Amino acid sequence: MEIKELYLKTVFCCMACDGDIAKEEISLLNKYAKENHLFDGLDIIQLIDNYVDAIHSEGRNFLEDYLKELSQARLTKEQELTIVKLSIETIEADNKIEYSEVSFFKEIRSHLDLTDESILKEMPGREEYLLPDIKSKNIITNLSLSFKNITLDANLLNS
């Protein structure tokens, strides 16, 4: 998987990990695509449609597969910091930070080789994302969310 697709999948998983995709999260995805050119060359609409279908059929396994892909990727420090930034900004996009989202970020972070200091330098004031989790280590298996309600209007993408 090329890095651009890993970035897109990161954003999607962070949008979906709470069981809902907010319009603000879609707006942020569009901003990344247009202003930052993070997904240039990718068929974003087709990939997101594929991700929605996959999360409907696979549920939590889709998120677990993403984490496996992340752990197998050979990323530079800069790419890892981009993953962190994309994750946190997506989680915060709808101004409603849920426990499942922060816990999912902690799962992402556990697959990266970054220090707390390097993360806080890139994303100051986000210490709560770095605190140890009081619940089970593997939040994904403990999620009691249904992903069947996740929908995405393709017209909102690239609007």
Image (spheres, grey):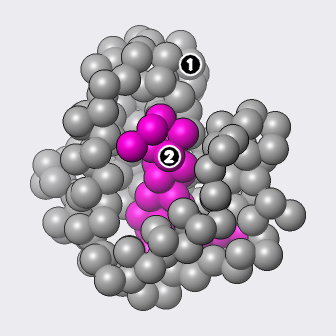
Residue 95 seen in render: no
- Pick the front one: 47 or 135: 47
Q: Residue at x 54, y 63 (%)?
A: 47
Q: Residue at x 49, y 17 (%)?
A: 78
Residue 117 seen in render: yes
Q: Is residue 40 magenta?
A: no
Q: Amino acid at mark 1?
A: Glu
Of mark 2 and mark 1, the one earlier in the sequence is 2
Give percent across and percent down for residue 156. 78, 71
The residue tagged 2 is 5
Numbered disc 2: secondary structure: helix
Residue 103 position (above or below residue 40):
below
The quarter in which the C terminus is drawn is bottom right
The quarter in which the N terminus is drawn is top left
Give percent across and percent down for residue 27. 76, 58
The residue tagged 1 is 122
Residue 3 position (above or below residue 55):
above
The quadrant in which residue 85 appears is: top right
Q: Amino acid at mark 2?
A: Glu
65 with respect to 150 (left or right): left
Give percent across and percent down for residue 56. 39, 82
